[in-house]
Image: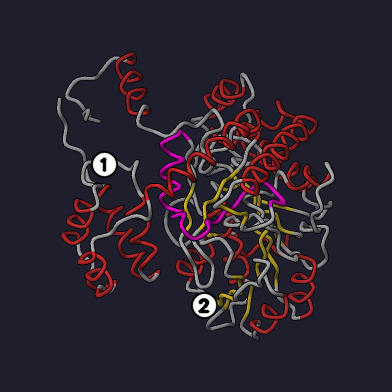
Amino acid sequence: MFEALPEQGVSGAQILGELGELRRADLPTHGGRLFAYVYDPALDGLDELAQAAYAISAHVNGLDPTAFPSLLAMENALVGAAARLLGGDAQTVGSVTSGGTESLILAVKAARDSRPELATPRLVIPSTAHAAFAKAAHYLRVALDVVPVGADLRADPEAMAAAITADTVLVVGSAPSYAHGVVDPIPRLAAIAAERGVRFHVDACFGGWVLPYLKRLGADLPPFDLSVPGVTSISVDLHKYAYAPKGVSILLHRTEELRLPQYFAFAGWPGYTMINPIVSSTRSGGPIAAAVATLRHIGDAGYLELARSTQDAVSTLAAAVTDTDGVRLFAPPEASVVCLAADPGVDIFVLADELAARGWHTQPQMSFGDLPATIHLTVTAAVAPTAKEFAADLAAAVVATRDRGPAQLPAPLLEAAGALTPEMITPQLVAGLAEGLGLGGGDFTQMAAVNSLLDAVPPALREALLTGFLSLLQRPSQSTE
């Protein structure tokens, strides 16, 4: 490993070569073979344009918009574009954040701080809501009420209504949910929240930018945005289906009054008065400039065509799952997600490994309550040219999975794991477990046994094990120079 701070400076050519070599170990960000983490429109020249725009504003500081009005202008332009796309009007305001998690944290903060008289403010979410809401509740000390979804994997309006109390500050719906890609019944949920005088947030971080275009193409999707009465805020990530580089999300509020509790201000020290609309203070203008360049280059007509390509790819992949013996669609592919489950005799985690061996990188999802383990495919426009190839490889991967049989875990390991509690997890135990599962050398290509073990333990223990493993990975590197 190289030394980040060498005694003498290193040439730019060498540094770029080293960074390129590091990237060789990463999953492919282009080519339509990675179904999570990245969003690829497969548009020639877009990366170069975004990088150039990023460089122009990389050293602009978002701390003070009066010092750098260019950044303020770009932020207002992005908020305006999102508001027009998502049912806003002349009263709609918003903020540019670093990502969906920050947008959701701020939505919860705005709701919490609007009710300062409450000793224990509460947040009501369906069980399919993004984990970032749990993070927000944890950070902000808001009580979290998780409501089971219906058999259709959507929020149950009656159950959500029953969970609302006098201390509820925010109710949440997803458009769509990340795990399964289905849209919650937003009009009913928003009406229930409004009747109780509670804010209602739509988490459209994942697919909010593509849903309006899918509707224009004829997709049968329910209303979900600020045009729905009772929706008080909505979030959408530009680094997902707007295809901007990572680091830009938009949080919209119906009115300025609703947004004000989101802000933080502090003048009680001898330095400058801190006034922050979002969590960060200092932040680079690079991601914001890159997002502006991306939106302006693609344009509304371009996004419609990208949505058409995504829709075609989803249809091809869904048909492949339906036509392949041994797997089935677990949720209706109504947006940009294909979620599949496996029949008995097909280990879903082995299947994920077999797909990876054929160059298809998917996202396994653990079982949860009565829901089985599944494989999640985030589908982007770049998948359209490769979707038919995936169909053939899926059939071959299922055959190979049956031939391999289920992931084998040593009985003593399963027995030991069954006796563990989160409090028993130590760095030494995690290191030994990682070595025993073949992760000691950093090879993450065969994960079926690991995923099977994680799936077999309770969520709290899974959290502790993965926290310990991440801590094991994040250690200062030792220079070889």
Is label 2 or label 1 in front? 1
Residue 277 visible: no
Q: Quadrant of residue 461?
A: bottom left
- Tell me residue 266's x, y (percent): 50, 60
Q: Which residue is mark 1?
A: 442
Q: Is residue 349 magenta?
A: yes
- Tell me residue 404's x, y (percent): 37, 48
- Above or below 195: residue 476: above
Q: What secondary structure is marked by label 1?
A: loop
Left or right: 252 as drawn, with respect to 7: right
CA distance for labels 2 and 1: 38 Å
Q: Residue at x 69, y 32 (%)?
A: 295
Determine contact: label 2, label 1, CB under 8 Å: no
The kind of residue tagged 2 is Ala
Bounds of the magenta segment: 333-359
Q: Residue at x 33, y 18 (%)?
A: 17
In depth, the one of 211 and 369 nearer the eye is: 369
Residue 257 visible: yes
In depth, the one of 31 and 279 nearer the eye is: 31
Q: Which residue is mark 2?
A: 143
Left or right: 251 as drawn, with respect to 416: right
